[in-house]
Amino acid sequence: MSGPSKRLTEGGLIDRSKSLGFTFDGKRYSGFEGDTLASALLANGEVLMARSFKYHRPRGVMSAGPEEPNALIKLRTGARQEPNTRATMIELYDGLVAESQNRKPSLRWDYQAMNQLIGRFIPAGFYYKTFMGPFANTKLWMQFEKLIRKSAGMGEASWEADPDLYTHRSAHCEVLVIGGGPAGLAAARAAAEGGGRVILVEETPHLGGRLRKDSEVIDGLSGSDWAAAMETDLAGRDNVRILKRTTAFGYYDQNMVGCCERVADHLVEPAAHQPRQRMWNIRAGRVIIAAGAVEQPLVFGDNDRPNIMLAGAVRAYVNEYGVLPGERAIVFANNDDGYRTALDLAKAGGNVKAVVDPRDEGAGELADAVRALDIPVLNGHAISRARGGATGIQAAEIVPVSGSGMQHMDCDLIAMSGGWQPTVHLSSQTGSKPVWDDSLKCFVPGAPRQKEVSAGAAAGTLSLADCLSAGRKAGAEAAGVSAPSWSAPKPESAGLKSNPTAALWEAPGTKGKRFVDHQDDVTTSDVKLAHREGFISVEHLKRYTTLGMGTDQGKTSNLNGLAIMASLTGKTIPETGTTTFRPPYTPVSIGLLGGPEVGKHFAPLRRTAMDSWHDEQGCEWIDAGLWRRPRYYPKAGEGIFEAYVRETKETRGGVGVCDVTTLGKIDIQGPDAADFLNRVYTNGWKALAVGKARYGLMCREDGIVFDDGTTSRLAEDHFVMTTTTANAVKVMAWLEYYLQFVWPDLKVQVTSVTDQWAAVAVAGPKSRALLEKVVDIDLSNDAFPFMACGDVSAAGVKGRLFRISFSGEMAFELNVPADYGRHVWEAVMKAGEELGAVAYGTEALGNMRIEKGHVAGPELDGRTTADDLNLGKMMSTKKDFIGKRLAYREDLVGDHRHKFVGLMPVDGKSKLIQGAQITENANDPLPVKMIGNVTSTGYNSETEMPIALGLVEGGLAREGDIVHMQYPLRNVTVPVKVCHPIFIDREGARHHG
Amino acid sequence: MLVINCPWCGPRDMEEFTYVGDGTLKRPEIGSEETDQKAWYEYTYIRDNPRGPHLEVWHHAAGCRQHVRVKRDTLTHEIHGCWPASGEMADTTEGETK
């Protein structure tokens, strides 16, 4: 459906010698270097670029910048496909592939455009109303919801992983200038004289801002040439860094500004090792926001038709891209600036049919210039409606603002200007509330909350001359330069007399859809409906109508929307207020935020010293925090169950070896070490002899059990503590907190040594026989009894040996410096060969502790007390410790507590399920009282039946009772018998061995 | 995105720190058997939620492993000072990030 070429034969800042081929919806086109996708499509006569969100209205481009609400495009294909990119911000490159979105089967013919016909049945808030209405919770609603979900949303992201690299970088500077337009250039130039580091960020590929889009002359140079000369000057300075294609999207605490540099978005694909985008975290002494302003559309009937554009955007297409968007144009502006569009269009050879200005007094000197070209100026008039369709517009209906009478005027382009709204987003993100300026009819930045200042159009300064001098002043002040040698030049446009902007929030008339928010399809009737239904605060207005909630965050709609609401409520605009702007200023890709921390770089993988050995055996792994641990070592044909049961039996029947390096290990030294342990553990430590280990229990201040483990006394003032793998980091920080903040007078040092020691558990009746071949000390019961510890030499390596048991068998734990971990492990395995030693993983480890009834993570669930776990005896009555005072509060004691028990299926074979609930009876009427839950499940390797640990009301007092395990998700009920949690060797004969 | 001026390491990004809790807390003395439950209840559960400057404990977990006391404005996120976990706190200039 492309029309004739709209490219001008000369002019613009594009390079006509460099032709670039691209496709849109599969059709081939060409543009020039310097084009955006939007300008290249326009140049090819394509005005229809998108379908709207809700009504699927045909849409063209409205702007030429980051505020674009309409022309959202699916860019690239395959894994690099990116939805909702703004055609106005996509730099054209050779080989670019773009597609329109939100349409079926084609952009020109979109069946969902019939939504326009049912528009009155889908007004603002229809979704919520349907929720509440007669169809709510019905089958019909379920179908309806599916339909809504299908039609919701815009483009589609790729389902493939993003193949590109994103990086993060930090930078510091004395002055950060955001925006490379006239004010920003002047600010950077003045600030550079201070000698401190200056960073200038510019969103587009070129410095100059509006200087590239308007016909300005400075020092005898065109605006763009002057900007280029400024760039040469700045780039030659050692203390200035210029970041182009970089958007400052977020203003964070302590003057940190997050920026996105689009390093390779303008290439077919990034070069090898080149990131697609780079995030800059810039910490600045002072920030100058010279981010410009966004021109606002006017609200009239069918104001969303393709080829109705912002007046400043029309100038951008003419002056920067050499495109004449329309042959017969009408300019509709409530301010003088719009008149420039009439002048530039006429200069480029366009026929300007009229300038329509709602102000009775019209414009100042620019109006004279327009009239001098014989262009009619209609003061006191407004466009009430545009006539046209998917391919553009044919005419406008023009009415007097007050009074009657309507005239049709043929046209193919409407350039509209509702005035310029300063880009207050970044200053607003700091918490500074924008302030309404009634003379400018816009919000200007409020008082700074951080070390920032807005300059130029971002502060409401609109004339070029004033922007240049304001930029210079801001730059000099930020850099502490009292009188910069550089003075701001005086552009030819300086001193032009103009008339103030007048408010025209909605043009007269009622016909046609009058769009306030083009991206979200919010019309004036939606705002009026919100008002009628009481959603009159701006925050309610936003959420009820979705005004300003699109990817453009209302850059071209918030002002009109809240002004219309203000007039409906009879309040002023400042009384009505404005919504808060939050980062990001424009959409930021998740890839950028994630940076290089993706895939295996997302989190470090902790490997024990014996990791490679386990891998060589082909073990199955399981994650334990950041660690990976062998879960089981399957033999041919074995599944997880067969493997861990075999490992359990071979350990209990002979000897097993397990890598327990991941347990937390904390070295505790100092004269007050025993006193400190006495405070953090519930049981006593002062009497522990050197060369002995002890099991310890820790509580939180609230009396709930926190962690457990064994701690050994290596010397009078030297202990080594072990913690669970899961709590290693937490316990370490917790000990440090008490030593540094609560009891700084204790002379104790704690150091995490988890990474420094490799740990090998050797368990089973033949464990002593095995280790006797590895270590150099006497391991007899007399010399090295249960709970002994001491220094050893193991396979030639100095280490420590502990006689502790988690499995309930006779067992030892050998610690050696991590660098020798694999060497010693192999020596142990070799010594065990003739004893039939088996390596066992975490499944067998866990199963043996369940058989032995030891508590672990699933039982220490943040709700259990020592009493609940049958460990009440470990709560010393002879000393004070953390958690003592609150452990016996009313609710933490008594018969209602769920206490630690063992559970067995009555039939001896039904599988028990971790997390299942326990009820008294099988089929009580609902609601049923939950009397407990299953915490851990395992398999008794000696009686060959499923077992479990759990917490049940009444605890061991109910031993022998039949209760019921319920798992309603799978409709499972199993009668289970409450039993003692120690399933094997209750007397502890084996580990004393 | 705060910068905390660790008294041991100098200015460091907040990502190196873990927020721990209220820095005004005083734990009842260890071994004082008579302490009533109310004092423990308040120490364990009750926290002020001030609007404005607040003394907090942060842990320089990815740094020197020291707990530090930080005076932070809960409204503006301004940091008024940072001191070691124990000992006197020399007051610093109000309003300046130290």
Image: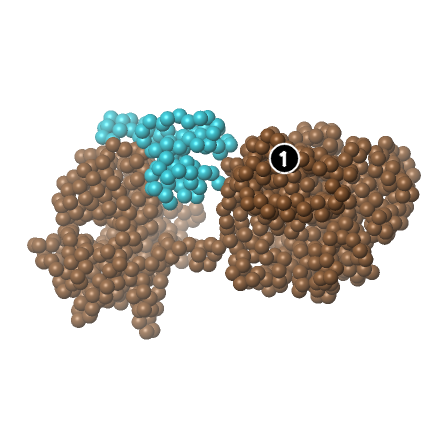
Chain colours: A brown, B cyan
Q: Is residue A604 above or below residue A721?
A: below
Q: Position of residue A141 (x, y in %)?
A: 63, 52
Subunit bearing disc 1: A
**For mark 1, what is the residue?**
A485
Asked whether residue A730 appears in the rendered view, the answer is yes
Q: Residue at x 86, y 51 (%)?
A: A349
Q: Position of residue A224 (x, y in %)?
A: 72, 47
Q: Which amino acid does the dot numbered 1 rest on? A: Ser
Q: Position of residue B32 (x, y in %)?
A: 24, 28
Work out which residue is located at the far bottom of the displayed protein and give it. A636
Q: Quadrant of the N terminus of chain A?
A: bottom right
Q: Residue at x 87, y 47 (%)?
A: A352
Q: Position of residue A867 (x, y in %)?
A: 26, 42
Asked whether residue A306 appears in the rendered view, the answer is no
Q: Quadrant of residue A465?
A: top right
In this rendered view, identify the residue nearer to me: A615 or A219: A219
Left or right of A920 in this view: A125? right
Q: Quadrant of residue A36?
A: bottom right
Label 1 residue SS: loop
Q: Residues within 10 Å of mark 1 (few under 14, many from 20)?
A: few
Left or right of A851 in this view: A181? right
